Every structure is written in structure tokens, then in C-alpha cells.
Image (cartoon, grey):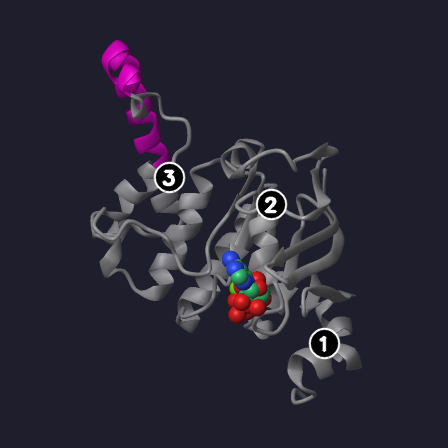
Amino acid sequence: MTLSVRGIGRSFGGFRALEDVSFEMPSTDLLGIIGPNGAGKSTLFSVVSGFIAADTGSVVLDGRPLDRLGAAARARAGMVRTFQVPREFHHLTVRENLMAAAPDQTGEGLFGLFLRPGRVRAEEAAIGAEADAAIEFLRLGAVAATPAGRLSGGQKKLLELGRALMAKPRLILLDEPFAGVNPVLVEQLIERITALNTRGIGFLVIEHDLDALSRLVPRLVVMDRGRVLATGTPATVLADPAVREAYLGGAVA
Ligand SMILES: Nc1ncnc2c1ncn2[C@@H]1O[C@H](COP(=O)(O)OP(=O)(O)OP(=O)(O)O)[C@@H](O)[C@H]1O
Ligand SMILES: [Mg+2]
């Protein structure tokens, strides 16, 4: 049960956004990814989750190379990501957004809708039940019928996590889950992510809030200019002079 990222490289035009990025984690663990703006963190998530292709290297989940699979196939293999800017449907309610995030719906194709209406109805009921479970788990009950566009920043992040959960993943990649989230909801997110982790779901978490992240994850990968600069416990990594120089500008006590 391992996620293995091996020698990933990716260029945009002549610009090397990722160069020889490698790390490994038990796929049931929590791993933090930090680094200055533009370090390549979100690009790494896009490569690992299959939204963009790598130029070099390989992503291997539980011994299976995923390189030829797109994002939908990787989601079916158990790995999903969230986006730095939440991608909810503004006009749909929270519950509808969750239902829309469920993969592989028979009714999505015209043929399914006309040929198997009974099955479509049963599937919709099952997906509705899953959406309700996610709403309860994430404590979004008060806004379940609210259009997602009207949610607070923190509630949108909770919905984003809920949308990821609808794919029943084993491993979730969270891109800045605490950005723009008030402190009370940050604590709620940490608590919910920890609860999911104790149920066996692994997490990769990109975050600039080092204090909150250090309370959530036991291990950090530090990126700088497309490369891995350091790996280790938050205490070790944040005390590393190279990390302080590159990432913190030596400014953090
Ligand atoms: N599709 C793209 N085309 C061209 N350049 C890109 C593309 N995506 C990312 N980049 C560039 O790659 C570099 C890494 O970007 P990335 O978004 O991965 O950084 P990041 O570490 O997530 O930063 P932040 O902390 O600000 O979110 C940046 O210089 C960015 O401009
Ligand atoms: Mg980013």
C-alpha cells in the first residue's frame, strides 16, 4: 500500500515546472507538501492525479503504474484530488453538487436513461444516500439545500472534500484546504481529515498554513523551484537551514 512518485519531470514551453521529483508514502498515511509560490506543488498534484501528463518519471500506486491512465481512471483506481480554487457548481445546491460528483452514473448516457430507468432510479437513490452521509459527516446539514455559490470559503472547502469523498477514494490529494478558511472551520477540517485517515484514507496535503499543517501531518515534503528540497518531520524540516533560506527567507523563528 504505497504511493511512489519517481523522477517526475514536466515542462511548460521552456520552463521546467517539475524536475526529478521523487518521494514515497504508505498510501494510508498523511503527507504534507509545502514550498513557496510557484514551486510546482499544484503541478505535481495535476501530474499525480492524471490531469496533466508527465514528461518523465512514473506514478505508481500499490505497485501499479498509473502513467497511462487519465484522471477519471485514476479516480476509479482510488485516487482523487481537489483544486486550489474550488470547482463547485455555483447554482446547484450542496446536495446536488455532491450527487453530481459521484462517478459512473448509468443515467448519464441517453441509452442508460431510456433503457434502464429502474436501475437509474435505484442508483440515484443510492447516490442521494451517499450525499446525505457526506453532508452529515462534514456537518453541512444547515446548508444542504443552499446553492454552493453562497457558501463561505470554509464551507466550499468542506464541500470540495465531500465531492472528493463521493468517489469513495483510498487516497485524496488536497490542494490548500485551509486557504481562506476561518480558524474554527480549519479545526473542523483537521478533525474530519484525521477521522477519515483513521478509517484508512490517505492524504497528500498542499498547504501554506504551516502551523495547521504541522498539526495534521507527521511528515512533510518541501518543494522549491520544481524540485524536492527536503523531506522529514515538520520539526526537522522547518529547522533545516536550506528550507528556511528557500522557503521562509530565514524569517521564521
Ligand atoms: N499550464 C501551465 N502553463 C504554463 N506554466 C504553468 C502552467 N501551470 C503551472 N505553470 C507554472 O509552473 C510553476 C509552478 O506552478 P504551480 O501552480 O505548480 O505552483 P505552486 O507551488 O502550486 O504555487 P502556489 O503556492 O502559488 O499555488 C509556476 O511558475 C507556474 O506559472
Ligand atoms: Mg498551487
Residue shown at 61% from the left, 41% from the top: 200
Q: Which mark is residue 118?
A: none
Of the two numbered discs 2 and 1 on the same chain, state the one appearing first in sequence.
2
Q: What element does badge 2 sit on? A: loop
Residue shown at 65% from the left, 36% from the top: 66
Q: Amino acid at mark 3?
A: Ala
Q: Main secondary structure of the magenta part?
A: helix
Q: Position of residue 138 (x, y in %)?
A: 39, 50
Discs 2/3, front: 2
Of the two numbered discs 2 and 3 on the same chain, state the one appearing first in sequence.
2
Q: Quadrant of the C terminus?
A: bottom right
**Is residue 161 visible to us here?**
yes
Q: Amino acid at mark 2?
A: Ala
Q: Position of residue 115 (x, y in %)?
A: 27, 10
Residue behind label 3 places its C-beta within 8 angstroms of ligand 2:
no
Q: Amino acid at mark 1?
A: Leu
Q: Is residue 78 left or right of residue 135?
A: right
Discs 2/1, front: 2
Q: Which mark is residue 53?
A: 2
| Disc 1 target residue | 238
User: 40 or 54, which is in the foreground?
Assistant: 54
